[in-house]
Image (spheres, rainbow, N blue to C red):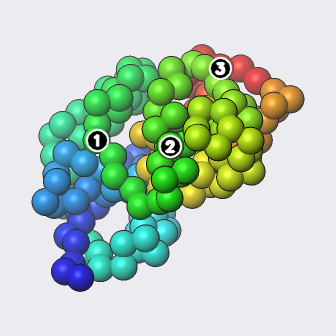
C-alpha cells in the first residue's frame, strides 16, 4: 500500500484549536477534522489509514474560506466540502445522515438510526458518532439523547453545548 500524503493545518477558534487534514491528491477533500491537539486527530486517523504521511502546511483556499465563513456564523459553510473517512457501510450511512441535519436542529440517536438501513441500531448509531473523525464538518454534535439531554461528545459535553448554542440551539 502506497503512502497517503496528508496536509495538516490548525486554526484557533472560540471552541479551541481546530485541526483539519486533507489528502494532497484530493486537496478539496477533508479526511480528518477535530478539536484539540493535532497529534490526537492524526493518531486516530492513522488507525484507519496506516500509511499516512503528514505534512504541516497550508490547506487549499476553499477549505480555509469555509472555516472562516463558519466562524463568522455561516453554519452552512461546510455543506459543500467533500469528506472522506474510512468506516463500515452503516457508519457511512450515519455520517451522511448527520450532514443532512440542518444547523440549529438536533435529532436523537434513535432518529439517526432510523435514517439508516438498520433503524433499530441505536447503539451502533451512537458509536458512529463517537467514531466520527471529521467534526464539525460531519456534525455529530447535533445528535442528542431521546430525552432531550445533550448526551456525550468526544470533545466534552461543554463543547457540544457551545457548538449547539453557536447554531442557536438551547438545551
> 144 or 120: nearer the eye?
120
Q: Secondary structure at mark 3?
A: loop
Labelled pair 2, 3 in contact (Cβ < 8 Å): no
Tell me: residue 50, above or below residue 124. below
Of mark 3 and mark 1, the one earlier in the sequence is: 1
**Residue 93, label in figure:** 2
Residue located 15% across and 40% down the image: 61
Tell me: residue 81, above or below residue 29. above
Task: Look at mark 3 in the image and give the residue it sits on.
Answer: 169
Q: Residue 68: in sight, yes or no?
A: no
Residue located 57% across and 57% down the image: 131
Q: CA distance from mark 2 to mark 3?
A: 24 Å
Of mark 1 and mark 2, the one earlier in the sequence is: 1
Residue 86 occupies quadrant: bottom left
Q: Quadrant of the N terminus?
A: bottom left
> 98 or 148: nearer the eye?
98
Q: Residue furthest right?
A: 147
Please provide percent x and percent y for residue 121: 71, 47
Q: Residue furthest bottom?
A: 1
Tell me: residue 41, above or below residue 2. above
Residue located 51% across and 21% down the image: 103
Task: Look at mark 1 in the image and give the residue it sits on.
Answer: 82
Amino acid at each position: 500500500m502506497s503512502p497517503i500524503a496528508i496536509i495538516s493545518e490548525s486554526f484557533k477558534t472560540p471552541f479551541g484549536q481546530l485541526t483539519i487534514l486533507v489528502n494532497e491528491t484530493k486537496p478539496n477533500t477533508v479526511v480528518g477534522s477535530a478539536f484539540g491537539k493535532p497529534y490526537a486527530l492524526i493518531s486516530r486517523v492513522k488507525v484507519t489509514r496506516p500509511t499516512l504521511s503528514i505534512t504541516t502546511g497550508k490547506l487549499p483556499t476553499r477549505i480555509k474560506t469555509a472555516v472562516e465563513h463558519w466562524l463568522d456564523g455561516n453554519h452552512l459553510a461546510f455543506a459543500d466540502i467533500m469528506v472522506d473517512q474510512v468506516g463500515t457501510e452503516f457508519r457511512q450511512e450515519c455520517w451522511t445522515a448527520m450532514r443532512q441535519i440542518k444547523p440549529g436542529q438536533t435529532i436523537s440517536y434513535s432518529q439517526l438510526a432510523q435514517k439508516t438501513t438498520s433503524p433499530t441500531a441505536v447503539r451502533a448509531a451512537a458509536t458512529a458518532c463517537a467514531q466520527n473523525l471529521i467534526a464539525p464538518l460531519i456534525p455529530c454534535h447535533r445528535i442528542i439523547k431521546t430525552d432531550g439531554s445533550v448526551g456525550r461528545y468526544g470533545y466534552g459535553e461543554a463543547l457540544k453545548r457551545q457548538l449547539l448554542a453557536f447554531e442557536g440551539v438551547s438545551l
